[in-house]
Amino acid sequence: MDEKKSLKKEKPPLNNYIKYSGLGFQMVGIIGVFTFAGYKIDESRQSKIPLFTAFLSLLGVIIALYIVFRGLKNTN
């Protein structure tokens, strides 16, 4: 009887792989969107130094890390 309860409490490892790979795709997507937006702003302003690309890509990394840490906190 105790074995059945312990089996129900354990999550299958496949669900963890799906969750963590989803977090990775979210990170790539967020960083990519912010970097692309910064690139387009720099392109439209015809700036020699890509400040918006650098700033928005850094902002995208910070936001992506926040989302990943929040997602990892909710799993435990």
Image (cartoon, rainbow, N blue to C red):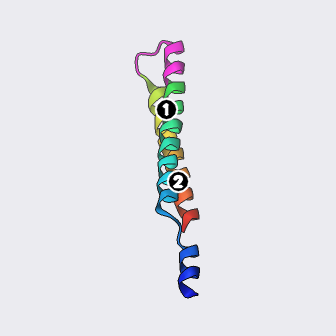
| Residue numbers of the magenta segment | 39-49
Using a 10 Å C-alpha cutoff, classify the residue at mark 2 as few (fewer than 14 neighbours), some (14 to 19) or many (20 or more). some
Q: Is residue 19 magenta?
A: no
Q: In front: 22, or 58?
A: 22
Q: In front: 42, or 15?
A: 15
Secondary-structure class at tag 2: helix
Using a 10 Å C-alpha cutoff, classify the residue at mark 1 as few (fewer than 14 neighbours), some (14 to 19) or many (20 or more). some
Amino acid type at image mark 2: Lys
**Above or below 51: residue 61:** below
Q: Position of residue 18 (x, y in %)?
A: 51, 52
Which quadrant holds residue 70? Answer: bottom right
CB atoms at circles 2 and 1 under 8 Å apart? no
Instruction: Give the residue at mark 1.
Output: 32
Q: Position of residue 44 (x, y in %)?
A: 54, 13
How many labels were placed on the picture?
2
**Residue 19: assigned label:** 2
Q: Is residue 41 magenta?
A: yes
Q: CA distance from mark 2 to mark 1?
A: 20 Å
Amino acid type at image mark 1: Gly
Horizontally, residue 58 falls left or right of residue 37, namely left
Residue that protrudes farthest toward the left in the picture: 49
Q: In front: 73, or 12?
A: 12
